[in-house]
């Protein structure tokens, strides 16, 4: 998946866990849509416990915030990376482990993601995906201009 924007926190402050946006291929979109459907189905049976009242399928869908975003023809998959600590996102190249890229934007990566949890507020809910490992290809800035 291509990294579309430099990872950052929601409010732009310096944080250890930050959001990263990928351009997902069609098979990843299909998988994310199935995860969304499964979470919504589970929420349907638990809407009273989650929101304090019985909600219809349509009402739950209105409250659901997917990690799959659509902006025109562009589809984005938002996940979280961790910069330091025991849960730090591990980065790899074909020859072994490497430091995280100084600049993610423009990189092509193969992430391993896990569905960490589902966040919940009074009016919305949605999945949190963590990138545990990431196979990083050279970014456009790192490619030799003479090739």
Image (cartoon, rainbow, N blue to C red):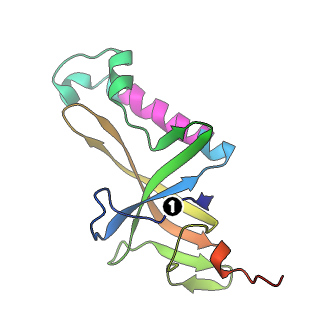
Placement of the C terminus among the 4 image quadrants: bottom right
Graded by Cα atoms within 10 Å as few (under 14), some (14 to 19) or many (20 or more), the crowding at tag 1 reads some
Numbered disc total: 1
Residue that sits furthest to the front in the current view: 145
Image location of residue 48, percent across then percent down: 20, 22
Left or right placement of residue 132 versus residue 146 in this view: left
Span highlighted in magenta in the image: 30-42
Residue 35 on the magenta segment: yes
The residue closer to the viewer here, 87 or 98, is 98
Left or right placement of residue 70 versus residue 54 in this view: right
Relative height, residue 28 to residue 49 (above, below): below
Placement of the N terminus among the 4 image quadrants: bottom right
| Residue in the image at 67% along x and 44% along y | 27
| Residue in the image at 38% along x and 16% along y | 58
Image location of residue 2, percent across then percent down: 62, 60
Residue that sits furthest to the right in the current view: 147
Question: What is the chief secondary structure element of the magenta stretch?
Answer: helix
Image location of residue 19, percent across then percent down: 40, 59
Task: Say if residue 137 shows up in the picture.
Answer: no
The residue closer to the viewer here, 29 or 46, is 29
Task: Say if residue 122 shows up in the picture.
Answer: yes
- Would you name the residue on which mark 1 appears? 5
| Residue in the image at 36% along x and 24% along y | 62
Quadrant of residue 146 within the rendered picture:
bottom right
Residue 125 on the magenta segment: no
| Residue in the image at 27% along x and 26% along y | 46
Mark 1 secondary-structure assignment: loop
Left or right placement of residue 143 versus residue 124 in this view: right
């Amino acid at each position: 998946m291509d990294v579309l924007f430099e990872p950052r926190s929601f409010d732009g402050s310096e944080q250890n866990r930050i959001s990263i946006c990928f351009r997902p291929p069609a098979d990843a979109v299909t998988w994310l849509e199935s995860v969304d459907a499964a979470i919504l189905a589970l929420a349907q049976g638990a809407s009273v416990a989650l929101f304090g009242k019985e909600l219809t399928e349509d009402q739950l869908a209105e409250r659901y915030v997917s990690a799959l975003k659509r902006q025109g023809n562009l589809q984005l998959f938002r996940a979280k990376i961790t910069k330091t600590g025991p849960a730090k996102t591990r980065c790899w190249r074909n020859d072994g482990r490497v430091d995280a890229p100084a600049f993610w934007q423009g990189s092509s990566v193969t992430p391993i993601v896990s569905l960490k949890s589902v966040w919940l507020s009074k009016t919305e809910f949605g999945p949190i995906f963590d990138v545990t490992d990431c196979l990083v290809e050279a970014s456009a800035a790192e490619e030799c201009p003479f090739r």
